[in-house]
Image: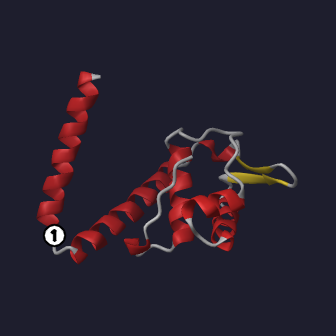
Amino acid sequence: MKIHISEADGVPIYLQIVNQVKYLVASGRLSAGEELPPIRVLAERLLVNPNTVVRAYRELELAGVVVKRRTSGTYVSDAGSRLARRDRLKIIVQRIDALLAEARQMDIGLDEVMELVRDRDEAMQTQHAED
């Protein structure tokens, strides 16, 4: 499970973890029954306080994305294996918000961001067609 956090993102770190795990589940990269890294391991990997990971895992559990098994860890729940469309859209909106905030910090206008998005989409479609 690969998670990348950014302190310059403007989104709290625990929410970055939550959003990325939800994205991994929604995209099928994490499947039902798959174990998430132990709290201490993920905290060390991300260089964050273990309490941040605890909070993220708690949020994921409350959302029904993961289940905790007392002595064996945290796993993707069967119910969390596919997020509803509104949940997937919410994740995308949060990523767009972060992108726009970063673009504003770098003095890059909306038109230029949209042009970059279109260019990247075209490049990805071309790459997919070649594969």
| Residue 103: % across, % down | 23, 69
Residue visible at 50% across and 50% down in the picture: 23
Q: For mark 1, give the secondary structure.
A: loop
Q: Nearer the viewer, residue 3 or 56?
A: 3
Q: Residue furthest right?
A: 71
| Residue 77: % across, % down | 71, 46
Residue 69 located left or right of residue 102: right
Residue visible at 70% across and 44% down in the picture: 35
Q: Amino acid at mark 1?
A: Ile
| Residue 57: % across, % down | 67, 62
Residue visible at 12% across and 63% down in the picture: 111
| Residue 51: % across, % down | 68, 73
Query: Which quadrant of the structure image shows residue 78?
Result: top right
Picture layout, residue 69 above or below residue 11: above
Q: Nearer the viewer, residue 9 or 27?
A: 9
- The scheme the figure's colours follow is secondary structure
* Residue with the mark numbered 1: 108
